[in-house]
Each structure stands twice: as C-alpha cells, then as structure tokens.
Image (cartoon, helix red, strand yellow):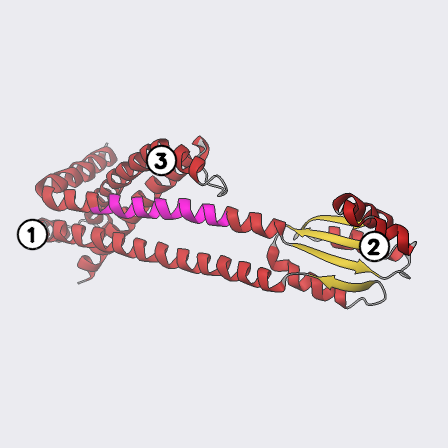
Amino acid sequence: MARFRTIRYIIGAAFGSMWRNLLTTFTAIITIAIMLIVFSTFLAVNDTLDHMIDALGRRTNLVAYVQDAAPPSEITALVQSVSARADVAEIVFVSREQAADDFRNTLSDLAEILDVIETNPFPASIEVRMADPEGLLPLADELRLQPALIDQVLVRADVVGRLLRVSNLARIGGGILIISLGAVTLFVIFNTIRLAVYSRREEIEIMRLIGATDWFVRGPFVVEGAVIGFIGAGLSAIAVVAGYARVGPTLESLVSFLPIQTQTGFVTNLALFTMLMGVLIGSVGSYFSVRRYLEN
C-alpha cells in the first residue's frame, strides 16, 4: 500500500510540475520532437547510404588469371579456400574454353579472330564477388603471393578506395550527428528539469529534512523527463510515419536507383526506436539534472 502511494505521489508530482511550467514543458516537447525528426531522417538517409555502399561493394569484382601450368587440384583447393572466407559472396572459376565462348558470344564480330589464330589465347580465371568490400584489397594481395598458381590479379583499387572512404566518412559523420543531436536534446531536458527543480526547491528541502531519500526526490523529475521525451518522440514518430506514407513512394519512384526503405516494417521499427530514444534521453537528462542539484 505504501509503495502504491509512493508511485501515485511521484506520478502526480510529475504531471503537476509539467502543468505549473506549461510553457517550458511545451517548448521542451517541441524541441525534442524537432530533434528526433532530424534524427529519424538521418537514420533513414544513413540506411539508404549503407544499402547503396553494400550494393556497390557487391558489384566490385576481383579477377585472378590462372597460370596455364597450374595443377588443377591446387586451383580447386584455392577456389575452395577463397569461397570459405566470410567476406566473399560468390566465386566463379572460368575455364579457358568458357572464356573463349564468352568472347565469341559477347563480341561476335571479332569471333573470326579465334579461328584465324587457331589457338585459345584466353587464360582460365577466378572471378570473386565480395560481400564486404573491405576484404577485396587484402584478398588481392594474398592471391598475388601465389605466383605458381596466379599469373595476374585485376582489381580497381581506386574504386575500392573511394568506396571505403565514402563508407568511413558516412559512419563518422553519422556518429558526430547522433552525438550532437543527443547532446542538444539532453541539454534541453536538463534545463527544463532544472527549472522545475528550482520552482520546487523549498518543497525538496522540506522532504530532505524529514528524511526523504534521494530516489524519492528524483522520482517525479525523472518521470517528468520521461513523459516529456515520450510525448516529443510520439510527435516525431507520427511525423515520420506520415512523411513516409506521403513522400516515400513518390521518392522511391523518382530515384528508383537508390535502395530507399519504404516498407511498413522499417518505418514501424524506426518510429519505435525514435520513441525509445525520446524516453531514454528524457529520463537520463532528468536524472543528472536532479542529481547535480542534490549534490550541490
């Protein structure tokens, strides 16, 4: 029964404080909603970039030309070894005969050249498609260290380098933006609760004099921060869902070459994650704001 009265007091005090500081509370909710809308938009853009980089990485191939004198058993073992790597998506062995046939089918106007020279000038090759482009250049170096089996390794190192740099910049920029938005939102919550604490400073001093624990004092403010974060995140989630419903399909049709996520599951997960972040940031900001006051 005492626990129920405590919970009722904490919740009542939280909503009472929000009502007394209505303008400040409203400002905090709108600010958090805007911050989380920007945050959700960034997450959607970052997801698109990740899918695009992944798709480009999967199209980045490595071609290793096999020595004519290489033993077939050792080539088979090499193909199996490379295909077992976690960063390799697909590996294909192209025989000399298949390479000649591909030449005839692709460049039919030049197919007579093969009949004139009467020999097959095409070497066998191993074509590798990567699941993770970061492993492409190390794999090329490993294959070059086997001159008895591999004659030449072709890979667009410049393209791979640019792809990896774009990927790293996107991750770094995303991390900086996440930290910045989180810091701004925490600052808003921190100062909102600080004003609420200041308006109730005499009540807090009386509670501490009669033996109230720090957690009993913190409780209403932590709940207040969580509610503000929840409402702000709820507004943000509504804006995200509505925005995707109206803009998503149109944007997907206009830039169909980009892997934009417009599925219901993705949008729902994004909205739920946004609400979780709002409640978490609101609670954490409130906790540290009250803690600083009590320590002082």
On screen, 190 above or below 18?
A: below
Q: Does residue 230 appear to the left or right of 250 in the view shown?
A: left
Q: Which residue is mark 3?
A: 247
Question: Which residue appears at 74% of the width and 51% of the height?
Answer: 83
SS of the residue under disc 3: helix
Q: Nearer the viewer, residue 157 or 37?
A: 157
Q: Position of residue 292 (x, y in %)?
A: 21, 59
On screen, 155 above or below 17?
A: below
Classify residue 262 by image quadrant: top left
Residue type at mark 1? Glu
Q: Which residue is mark 1?
A: 202
Q: Spatial distance from mark 1 to mark 3, Cα to Cα?
A: 51 Å
Q: Position of residue 226 (x, y in %)?
A: 26, 43
Label located before the other in sequence (1 or 3): 1
Q: Is residue 288 visible?
A: yes
Q: Which residue is mark 2?
A: 124
Using the image, tell me which numbered label, if any, was put on residue 236: none
